[in-house]
Amino acid sequence: MAKVEVKDDRRYTKDHEWAKSDGDDLVVGVSAFAVEQLGDITMVTIDVSEGDEIEAGKPYGTVESVKTLADLFAPVSGKVLRSNEALEDEPELINDDCYDKGWLIAIAPSDASQVDGLLDAKAYTAHLETEES
């Protein structure tokens, strides 16, 4: 498997999503590994709205690609602050820049310590080495 970019400034889930602290907010997206596995992303559906409560591990939307349809799972529980509306018209932003312009939602965690339970970059890289490609 080719080495994919894993950024040190965020935490990761085993479902290949990232979470980056932005003040008190947590911005969430999909990792470069997920993008590589999905292929060209053709549609993003976010099933939550601003103000909705979401629960860690529960689906909040889907990403559709030429290969598959994949659920998006909340990395932490909390309140949805905003979603990336640009993805409605430009889902390919995830392919182009999954760690910046291709973010999905921002969450106000109900308990900030939840973030500590996510994988750091080193642990996520180790997790990737165990994944079958």
Image (cartoon, rainbow, N blue to C red):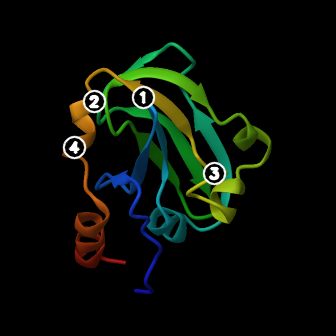
- Is there CB contact under 8 Å for labels 3 and 1? no
Q: Residue at x 45, y 86 (%)?
A: 2
| Sequence-first disc among 4 and 1 | 1
Q: The residue under label 1 is which amino acid type?
A: Asp
Q: CA distance from mark 4 to mark 2?
A: 8 Å
Element at label 1: loop
Mark 4, residues whose alpha carbon is within 10 Å: few (<14), some, or many (≥20)?
few
Q: Which mark is residue 116?
A: 4
Q: CA distance from mark 3 to mark 1?
A: 20 Å
- Circle 2 is placed at which residue position? 112
- Is there CB contact under 8 Å for labels 2 and 1? yes
- Residue 46 placement, left or right of 129: right
- Circle 1 is placed at which residue position? 24
| Sequence-first disc among 4 and 3 | 3
Mark 1, residues whose alpha carbon is within 10 Å: few (<14), some, or many (≥20)?
few
Residue sitting nearer the eye, 41 or 53: 53
